[in-house]
Image (cartoon, rainbow, N blue to C red):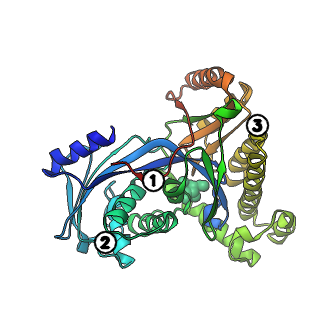
Amino acid sequence: MGALEVREGFTALYGTAPEGVWAAPGRVNLIGEHTDYNDGFVMPFALPHTTLAAVARRTDGVLRLHSADMPGAPVELRVADLTPESDRNWTAYPAGVVWALSQAGHEMTGADIHLSSTVPTGAGLSSSAALEVVVALALNDLHGLNLRGWQLARLCQRAENIYVGAPTGIMDQTASACCEAGHALFLDTRDLSQRQIPFDLAAEGLRLLVVDTRVGHAHSDGEYGRRREGCEKGAALLGVDALRDIPADGLDAALDRLGDEEEVRRLVRHVVTENARVERVVSHLQSDDLRSIGPILTEGHISLRDDFRVSCPELDLVVDTALAAGALGARMTGGGFGGSAIALVEETDVEPVTEAIEKAFTTAGHTPPRVFEAVPSAGAHRVD
Ligand code: GAF
């Protein structure tokens, strides 16, 4: 659905025109997984798939939320009554953003919101962050709040952590708010300093395939939280604020100090080596050496599979099959336990790699995956 249809949908629904239409994208994380809640480095880029929001302010404190992708009439809430962890539906994300803005001292007088999204849901491609960020940006513009992208990302993370109740890091919201077309975002999640790194796959004759395994990660919340707690335990045992503070050349000494804490040792090893992988990828991209990032992506997958233990058979099958069919590198992307994997391939290998993955899924009796090419696209913006 395009901006015009969302605008018209709003008018048909609420009987008046919206004040504008905004878009926020989903993301793929190129490298830097499970590092964001360890104050580490990440490197996502925005997908062309976006969530669109047509929005108009209200003055009576009522918040009406509707999505063209969900059945039913608009959900009507009162801004003054918004309460963390009171809503288990999709509406918790936009309502959480309104709550977070009010909590931050911005007067929220109510709004009518109509949404439509092309970001695949449950695919580990940040459909929730897109939903949060598009609402945050629209309200930021309409109320003249002048908040920067990273500030909106922080508010959206609060919405997700406290209002929705999911203990995620800051990567997805920052990616949706701050990415730029043709670039990957090198983000230091400790201070949110950012660098846009040119990432023009097509110019180098390369493609990045996204493979949505269609394995939902609905049961992952508890596992995600457990990994996070394990990392915090590691930092506490090592006497640092966050695992980010363990340098790559201090890893062996840190592992020695953790003694027989086997699980914590594995988590620490992943986070420390993953931060180093992000820095290596940045350095290759800066020397226009895109092909060299392939093996680093694959190393990242092995670390997530064996040390962090957040992969699953379907993600491993994508990676193994893509590599056997000629991909330069492949890894799961996002939180894991399902969702999507990525594969860096020569332009000429798109078809054989795609076909090999589809065939492997059929042979294994899995639901057919959804495969598409990802082009680094724009972050959140006003479209109308
Ligand atoms: C999910 C979370 F939302 C992110 O914050 C990040 O931790 C990611 O998993 C793993 O890198 O997408």
Image quarter for ligand 1 equals: bottom right
Residue at 57 percent of width and 36 percent of height: 210
Q: Nearer the viewer, mark 1 or mark 2?
A: 1
Residue at 15 percent of width and 52 percent of height: 16
Q: Nearer the viewer, mark 1 or mark 3?
A: 1
| Residue 223 in sight from this viewpoint | no
Residue 128 higher or lower than 188, as above or below: above
- Find the distance from the CA under tag 2 to the CA under tag 3: 48 Å
The x, y position of residue 115, in whole percent, is 30, 49
Instruction: Classify mark 2: helix, strand or loop.
Output: loop
What amino acid type is highlighted by mark number 2? Thr
The 10 Å Cα crowd at callout 1, few under 14, some 14 to 19, many 20 or more, is many
The 10 Å Cα crowd at callout 3, few under 14, some 14 to 19, many 20 or more, is some
Residue at the spot of label 1:
380
Residue at 62 percent of width and 21 percent of height: 351
Residue 97 higher or lower than 311, as above or below: below
Q: Earlier in the sequence, mark 1 or mark 2?
A: 2
Instruction: Classify mark 3: helix, strand or loop.
Output: helix
Residue 292 higher or lower than 324, as above or below: below
Residue at the spot of label 3:
291
Taking depth in this image into account, of 32 and 376 the one nearest to the observer is 376
Instruction: Find out if the beta carbon at label 3 lies less than 8 Å from the nearest ligand 1 atom.
Output: no
Q: Quadrant of residue 56?
A: bottom left
Q: Earlier in the sequence, mark 1 or mark 3?
A: 3
The 10 Å Cα crowd at callout 2, few under 14, some 14 to 19, many 20 or more, is some
Residue at the spot of label 2:
83
